[in-house]
Amino acid sequence: MKQSHNIALILAGGTGERMHAVVPKQFMEIDGESVILHTMKAFQQHPLIHEIYLVTTPEWEGFARKEAERGGIDKLCGIVRAGESSFASARNGIEHLAETITDDDAIVLVHDAVRPLITQDIISRNIAVCLTRGNAITALPSYEAYLVTKNGSTSDRFLPREGLMRAQTPHTFPLATLHQMIQLAREHSINESQSIFTLAGELGITPLHIAQGDLRNFKITEQSDILIYRALKTMEE
């Protein structure tokens, strides 16, 4: 495999509204370890990840730095100020990297902090697919059909599961491509998108190439997800 400069950009700016908790879910301590530290450890431990950058709000920056120090995360190279949405946070992080990193060919893995059980294999696959195909979107096959609804209570059509995949993170692109996407978004007055890969689709930066995900790489969103995380984390240990 071609040697590359690989950077993890971890988005940790969420406020945890859906969790109805005082502490944002990425900073919750579960069984003696914060979620954000567990996420950082996954990238710290991977031999092909060279640098980690974190995007979070100013009020949680100190906590994040203390957790990184406590966990021996010496790959953490910077913390970037979060925006008002996940997309704005990703944009801030990408623009910071574009100003900081001189290697335009660097590979950037954009990852949700609240997916702490990302595996080493997922990281490896993202890097390999991006290097050989130009980008990598972590995804899993869908085993269910999907109802299409406007109000959350009724539906008059569905999407068959064939041909559908569930996207996870990381979303992995060369830094130069990510910077170009952000610049194009500004030119087209695109101020919001569900994710980096949906922005790529909106801008016509396709095809997007799949890196196989893992069921364990789920997003902690609801209170019930904490139970799943705790159980899987125990099995991991």
Image (spheres, rainbow, N blue to C red):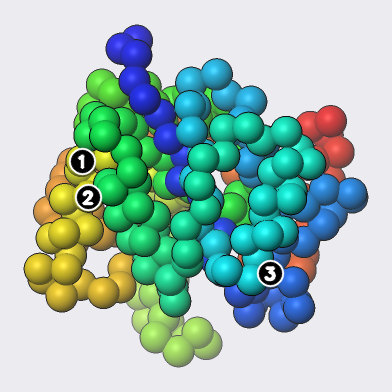
The residue singled out by tag 1 in the image is 176
Q: Is residue 206 above or below residue 201?
A: above
- Mark 1: which secondary structure? helix
Q: Does residue 170 appear in this view? A: no
Task: Inspect the image, locate mark 2, and give the three-letter code of the amino acid beneath it.
Answer: His
Q: Residue 119, position in %: x, y?
A: 61, 32
Where does residue 140 sit, x and y in percent of width and height?
47, 42
Figure quadrant of residue 64: bottom right
Identify the residue at image location x=16%, y=50%: 180
Q: Residue furthest right?
A: 31
Instruction: Tell me the SS state at disc 3.
Output: loop
Cα gap from disc 1 to disc 2, whole angstroms: 5 Å
Name the amino acid type tagged 3.
Pro
N-terminal of the pair, mark 2 or mark 3, is 3
Q: Residues within 10 Å of mark 1 (few under 14, many from 20)?
A: some
Residue underneath mark 3:
24
Question: For this view, does 174 lie left or right of residue 115?
Answer: left
Query: Quadrant of the image for the C terminus?
Result: top right
Mark whose residue sits in front, 2 or 3: 2
Question: Which quadrant, please, contains the N terminus?
Answer: top left
Calculate the distance from the C-alpha at mark 2 to the C-alpha at mark 3: 28 Å
User: Contact, CB < 8 Å: mark 1 with mark 3?
Assistant: no
Q: Is residue 186 above or below residue 55?
A: below
Name the amino acid, label 1: Ala
Dot 1 and dot 2 residues touching (CB under 8 Å): yes
SS for dot 2 = helix
Mark 2 lies on residue: 179
Kindly identify the residue that appears in the image at 16 percent across and 68 percent down. Answer: 186
| Residue 117 sits in quarter | top right
* Residue at the image point whose x is 68% and y is 60% from the top: 62
